[in-house]
Amino acid sequence: MKATAVTPVVLGLLAGKPRSGYDIKTVVDRSTRFFWAASYGQIYPELKRLEKAGLIAGVEDPAGGRQRRAYTITATGEEALHDWLASGSDLHFELRHEGVLRFFFADALEPDERLELLETIRAEHLQVRRELQQIQPAAEQLCAESGDRFPLLTLETGIAYQDFFLNLCDRLKQRLAEPQPVKGGP
Amino acid sequence: MKATAVTPVVLGLLAGKPRSGYDIKTVVDRSTRFFWAASYGQIYPELKRLEKAGLIAGVEDPAGGRQRRAYTITATGEEALHDWLASGSDLHFELRHEGVLRFFFADALEPDERLELLETIRAEHLQVRRELQQIQPAAEQLCAESGDRFPLLTLETGIAYQDFFLNLCDRLKQRLAEPQPVKGGP
DNA sequence: GCTCACATGTAATCCGTTACATGATTCT
DNA sequence: AGAATCATGTAACGGATTACATGTGAGC
């Protein structure tokens, strides 16, 4: 059983409580999406793979007449999750930020276009910040109910992360307003 | 000519000065890699595409007897670059952070393992910070020579970004040390 | 003579998203 | 009645990485 990118997400979410594939996708979109996304095309095949490997167990669990298959983590699965969580180094880290890329090439822009770019970047991070803040009450409730404070701490991290970019844009705007030293001197 | 993920990087770098595919890859690995990566498998086909579309022009430019094809940006190419740089909204943004993902699921860890995890995350960001700092002198020189301060500002952004994670790990470590309120009260 | 950096390219492979197909149930 | 949500799944497509193949020149 080689672990793929979705393995830990699925395993981690099932460690909380039994869930269906649809359920997992919904939770991912409201939580890990901001630093670890997953699609149906990954989740459903992965559930079958993990079941075959004995890390999770599926049971038919229809709600009403509606088809539904819920999965529970097994003891082996919990072990595998713990192993992954506690295994050291080489944590995958990747950022794709088109705004920063554009800023990198901003020499080709006019001064007012540069400010506009920073404004656009700022606006997009502000939007994400709002989305995260909307989730916060639900995360706080979940924390109080389950006693697991890590999803809430992670959400707060996400908000602080957006704040970093908001501050960054403000600082860069100020630095662009400062007169830059010209070659040859004044 | 539909733009792909590498189009702006290639165009942006050629706007500075003529370069070979190999050269582009080298510069990318020392600069944009941290927020926008690119591989040979993308760069070389893209150069051919952009030349066919008339956005760049290639000239044989052997150094010694060594084969080398350098590309220059055309007026059309400069226009396309500017259009992309100045076009509004919907900036692609994506983060994949395995450390944060693990922290999200850290309820399944022992207290000391949680601290270890934060330490691992911290160490990896510190490592990236060091790499960026090593580039700084070269970036400063380039800034002084070319008058383009945006690569340097972007590098400084990258360092500040690593600092955000370093501080985050420290703050989270402190918060984990605080006694958490237990259900039912003390 | 050997190793490293310069240099170009592509094929195989892996991976993930998107879109579609299908259908039941609940809410308005 | 119709829309939205719950629910499962896959096929096609697009995109990117990896690895390989190949060769020159410079420095030790």
Image (cartoon, coloured by chain):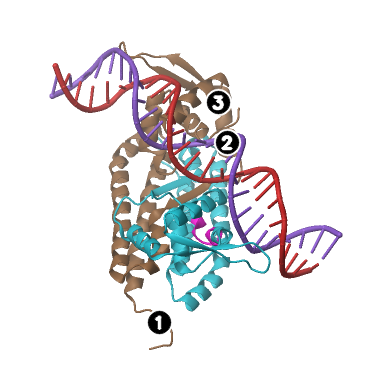
Chain colours: A cyan, B brown, C red, D purple
Kind of residue sitting beneath label 1? Pro
Q: Residue B84 — which label?
A: 2
Left or right: residue A101 compared with residue B162: right
Label 3 – label 1 distance at C-alpha: 61 Å
- Give the dominant element type of the magenta stretch: helix, strand or loop: helix
Dividing the picture into quarters, in which one does residue B68 lie?
Answer: top left
Label 2 – label 1 distance at C-alpha: 51 Å
Secondary-structure class at tag 1: loop
Dividing the picture into quarters, in which one does residue B71 lie?
Answer: top left
Q: Which of marks 3 and 1 is in front?
A: 1
User: Residue A112 magenta-drawn?
Assistant: no
Q: Is residue D3 above or below residue B172?
A: above
Which quadrant would the C terminus of chain A be assigned to in this image? top left
Kind of residue sitting beneath label 2? Trp
Residue at 52%, 53% in the rendered image: A43
Kind of residue sitting beneath label 3? Gly
* Magenta stretch bounds: A27-34
Residue at 58%, 30% in the rendered image: B80
Label 3 – label 2 distance at C-alpha: 11 Å
Q: Which numbered disc, 3 or 1, marks the residue that appears first in the sequence?
A: 3
The answer to whether the residue labelled 3 contacts the one labelled 1, judged by CB atoms less than 8 Å apart, is no
Residue receiving disc 1:
B181
Q: Residue B77 — which label?
A: 3
Q: Is residue A68 visible?
A: yes
